[in-house]
Amino acid sequence: MGSAELDRHDPSNGEPTVKVSILFAAQADGVADLKLYGRLAEQQSCRLWIGQSLLVESHQLFAALAGSGMSIDVGISVAIAPLRTPYDAAVQARSLAKLMRRSVSVAYGIGTPAFAETLNAAAVSTPGSFTSEYVRDVKSLVNGAGINSEGPNPVRLYPMDAPSVEIGCGLLRPRMAVKAGAVADFVVTWLTPKSYLHNVLMPELQRGADSENRERPRVVAILQCAIAAETRNPVQLSYVGYSGHLQQPHYRDMFAKAGAVLTGEIANDVRATLKTGIFAYGSASEIADEIRTYADIGVDEVVLNMVGVAAVEGHQAAIDDMKQVMDCLESRTTTGAKNE
């Protein structure tokens, strides 16, 4: 068992654990850098995630990995829903699962409101409803039920055997949590303080699931992190990693609800958000400790995001950090099993 494929409950002591995966956090103009992360995912038997690439498209990047002979679980978070119809989204996701010969997870969101408005030629007045309805349609298609299946013009995918496709959405605010709980297979959080996830989003996610008498969607948390070193500054790594997000109203609203005092001066805002615990910075062992705490609040998968390290020092440095953290987790699991 690779370090990233931990069961929901650790067999050595019965305590909850969490899967660990990795993220390629860059806009890709080719597949060479992504292959480096793909090889680590192969070694660790973990899922490789990527965001929406507006250079070489995300599904095609993963298809190129499959064509090179790799067979790994992959995920896209978040894919910008207005870029494609639900039918095309379902075809793309299922095709990728077929080519990769492994499971595929795709989470959708609207991106920025301005971008969504441009793509739709009109404002998306209710982003939560738009996303949840989109997820419902894509799920229905990949599961074979189709859209308008009871009406005069049903729309279905042509039958084809393929590995499982998991359909979800990005999660940032409480209203979306309720809607996602009612329909999504999984949700993904980004830049979300753990306390806010636990105290605000998780109860609303469960409320949405209860409203449809279904299980709560799987929760995937993307965690920005870096192994501490004398040559590294966590504020600098955070600034290059997510300062652009802090200029978006929906992220600022989320951080305000999480207790961060934002002034509009980006450098100060980065420091303020660091105080909410969104960036795990320390030794491999300390980061592993932080990852374990996510299991305690019900998170099912933590995705290592070394975007700051990759931007400042290159992808290989980010991969080295990821491997150290996962090796540390694996060592603890193995030691626990031996001590039974």
Image (spheres, rainbow, N blue to C red):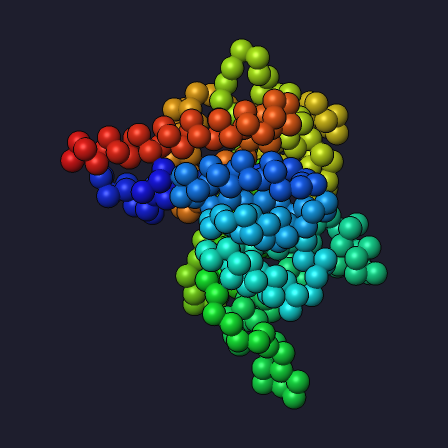
Q: Quick one: 20 or 130, which is closer to the camera?
A: 20
32 to the left or right of 187: right
Residue 264 in the image: x percent, y percent?
75, 29
Q: In this view, does 340 lie above or below 213?
A: above
Identify the residue shown where x is 64% and y is 23%.
312
Name which quarter of the figure residue 265 lies in.
top right
Residue 39 in the image: x percent, y percent?
48, 39
**Furthest-top residue in this view:** 230
**Furthest-left residue in this view:** 340
Name which quarter of the figure residue 142 lies in.
bottom right
Residue 114 in the image: x percent, y percent?
79, 50
Q: Quick one: 211 or 305, which is closer to the camera?
A: 305
Whether residue 70 can be seen here? yes
Q: Quick one: 165 or 97, which is closer to the camera?
A: 97
Residue 339 in the image: x percent, y percent?
17, 31
Identify the residue shown where x is 16% and y is 35%.
340
Whether residue 237 can be seen here? no
Image quarter in which the N terminus is found: top left
Q: Quick one: 283 or 72, which is closer to the camera?
A: 72
**Furthest-bottom residue in this view:** 152
Name which quarter of the figure residue 91 lies in.
bottom right
